[in-house]
Image (tube, rainbow, N blue to C red):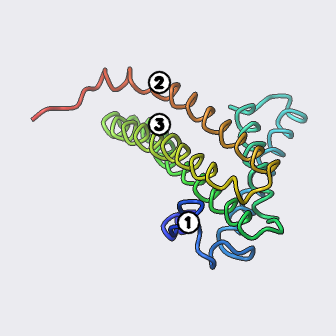
């Protein structure tokens, strides 16, 4: 996804789009979409196993399944492509932009490691990085993605346009709720450990 985002080029309709080498069906970006679908399926099977065999639900299972459903609904038409080349380009470029949201996950995982290691100062720094990266990659980025998708209305089938716009809007709303929860969880800790002054 990072490779595709860095390589985005200006486009007269979509604002920015993937170059031909990266937007093709056998290119690295579409392969990444396929790998993600495999992960979603594996995680859904794990949740089903935990619930059906071990009689317990894993942590955040409902949110994970909801995320996988939204993401899979976006991935499948991008992997399959459509008969309209411009429509396929809009789909794959938009989904590649959406994957930038995972940038914030790096700081989320590092923050968890710092918490387990009881590294409070490091955790505080990572919490600030998480808040900033989450706002940039999941709120600002998705807002820009939706604006680009609205410009693609002229080359996308009406039904597909409405479906993807609904998915993008749902993802934005989900990210906004997560961001509020993130702030509520992080701000008290930040206040207890104010930044040191020179």
Query: Few, some or many C-alpha atoms within 10 Å of disc 2 (few <14, some 14-19, many ≥20)?
Result: few
Query: Few, some or many C-alpha atoms within 10 Å of disc 1 (few <14, some 14-19, many ≥20)?
Result: few
Callout in the foreground (1, 2)? 1
**In this view, which residue lies farthest toward the right?**
52
Return the residue at label 2: 185
> Relative to 19, is 192 on the left or the right?
left
Position of residue 6 relative to residue 164, above or below, is below
Q: Residue at x 71, y 40 (%)?
A: 67
Residue 104 appears at what percent x and percent y?
Answer: 49, 46
Mark 1 element type: loop
Return the residue at label 3: 116
Mark 3 element type: helix
> Relative to 181, is 95 on the left or the right?
right
Q: CA distance from mark 1 to mark 3?
A: 49 Å
Q: Earlier in the sequence, mark 3 or mark 2?
A: 3
Residue 171 appears at what percent x and percent y?
Answer: 65, 39
Position of residue 14 relative to residue 60, above or below, is below
Q: Earlier in the sequence, mark 1 or mark 2?
A: 1
Q: Earlier in the sequence, mark 1 or mark 3?
A: 1
Residue 59 appears at what percent x and percent y?
Answer: 69, 32
Picture quadrant where residue 173 is located: top right
Closer-to-camera residue (54/12): 12
Return the residue at label 1: 12
């Amino acid at each position: 996804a990072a490779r595709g985002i860095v390589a985005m080029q200006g486009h007269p309709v979509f604002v920015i789009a993937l170059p031909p080498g990266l937007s093709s069906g056998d290119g690295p970006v579409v392969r990444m979409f396929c790998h993600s679908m495999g992960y979603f399926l594996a995680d859904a099977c794990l949740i089903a196993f935990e619930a059906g065999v071990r009689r317990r639900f894993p942590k955040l299972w409902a949110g994970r399944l909801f995320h996988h459903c939204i993401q899979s609904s976006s991935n499948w038409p991008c992997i399959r492509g459509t008969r309209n080349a411009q429509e396929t380009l809009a789909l794959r470029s938009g989904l590649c932009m959406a994957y930038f949201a995972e940038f914030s996950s790096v700081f989320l995982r590092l923050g968890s490691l710092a918490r387990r290691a009881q590294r409070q100062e490091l955790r505080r720094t990572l919490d600030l990085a998480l808040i900033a990266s989450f706002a940039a990659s999941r709120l600002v980025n998705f807002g820009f993605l939706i604006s680009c998708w609205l410009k693609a209305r002229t080359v996308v089938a009406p039904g597909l346009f409405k479906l993807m716009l609904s998915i993008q809007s749902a993802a934005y709303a989900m990210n906004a709720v997560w961001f509020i929860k993130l702030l509520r969880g992080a701000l008290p800790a930040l206040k207890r450990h104010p930044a040191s002054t020179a």
